[in-house]
Amino acid sequence: MKAKRLLVLLTTFSLLFGASVYAESQWGDYEGFSKVKMRLDGAEVKVGDNEAPAILMKERTMLPLRYVAQSLHTLVKWDAAAQTVDMNRPNVHMLFAKDATDDLSTIRNPFSRVAQGRSGLFYVFVDADGITFPIEGFKITVYSPSGDAVAASSLEVPPKTDDAFWYLWPANVNFSQKGDYVVKVAFLYKGEFTVVSEKTITSS
């Protein structure tokens, strides 16, 4: 049944409704259900043409699990045989430092703000644990305030025998724009990248 298939793919959030609920949404229909617009931090979240959108079903709002999980920095695994969704939200922390020892064993002068126009090397320290899925790799990317990727690490492979690791990446960024530079850590799992941590460096 269509409803059962949708319930497998979607997660439910209850909403209290006002005096009336319109049968047809201004955003269109999907499989006979009214579509709902999704926004995250004020920005519209768009799904692909072949993916289930947010809908209204029996006076409840159903949101696509993948997009909810991504906003929570969570890995998702679907087990079709067991009809079960498994999720893992690892603990991934970042620290930025201006300097490090020659052997990269110790970082010095941590920071979270820089002067606009500063250019050069700094270090991104990643400390990850609580990993229960066998991730295939990870990468770090720095995005400018305009959303462009201005630096990225190579694809790194974490230890296979542990649920935790730490990593120190030397990044070279020109903070030419004013605003927040976003640093994201993404894990590669089953051929797809999922952002599991993000932190900002403010350029002013």
Image: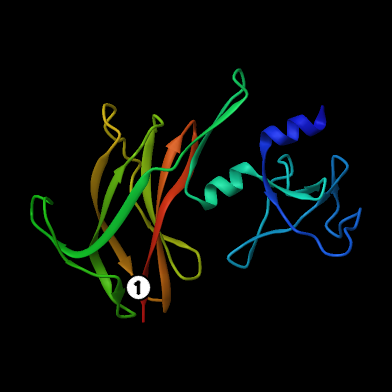
Look at the picture and state if 57 lies above or below 144: above
Q: State the residue in front, 4 or 195.
A: 4
Q: How many marks do you count on the picture?
A: 1
How was the colour assigned to the protein in this rendering?
rainbow
Q: Look at mark 1 in the image and give the residue it sits on.
A: 175
Question: Residue 94, position in %: x, y?
Answer: 30, 56
Q: Residue at x 30, y 34 (%)?
A: 163
- Give coordinates of residue 104: x percent, y percent: 13, 51
Residue 6 locus on image (x, y percent): 74, 35
Q: Is residue 40 toward the left or the right of residue 22 in the image?
A: left
Q: Which one is nearer the viewer's eye here, 37 or 23?
A: 23
**Furthest residue to the left?**
102
Which quadrant does the C terminus fall into? bottom left
- Measured as percent of width and height from the top left, residue 72 is found at 50, 51
- Which quarter of the figure has residue 8? top right
Q: Badge 1: few (under 14), some or many (20 or more) residues near its Cα, within 10 Å?
A: many
Residue visible at 24% across and 68% down?
120
Label 1 amino acid?
Phe
Task: Assign a secondary structure to mark 1.
Answer: loop
Q: Would you place residue 134 above or below residue 125 in this image?
A: above
**Could you say which quadrant of the image residue 106 lies in?**
bottom left
Q: Quadrant of residue 65?
A: top right
Q: Does residue 58 appear left or right of residue 47 in this picture?
A: right
- Which residue is most to the top? 81
Q: Residue at x 86, y 60 (%)?
A: 26
What residue appears at the point 34 percent right and 49 percent down from the top-left corner? 92
What quarter of the picture does the N terminus occupy?
Answer: top right
Tell whether 162 sits left or right of 17. left
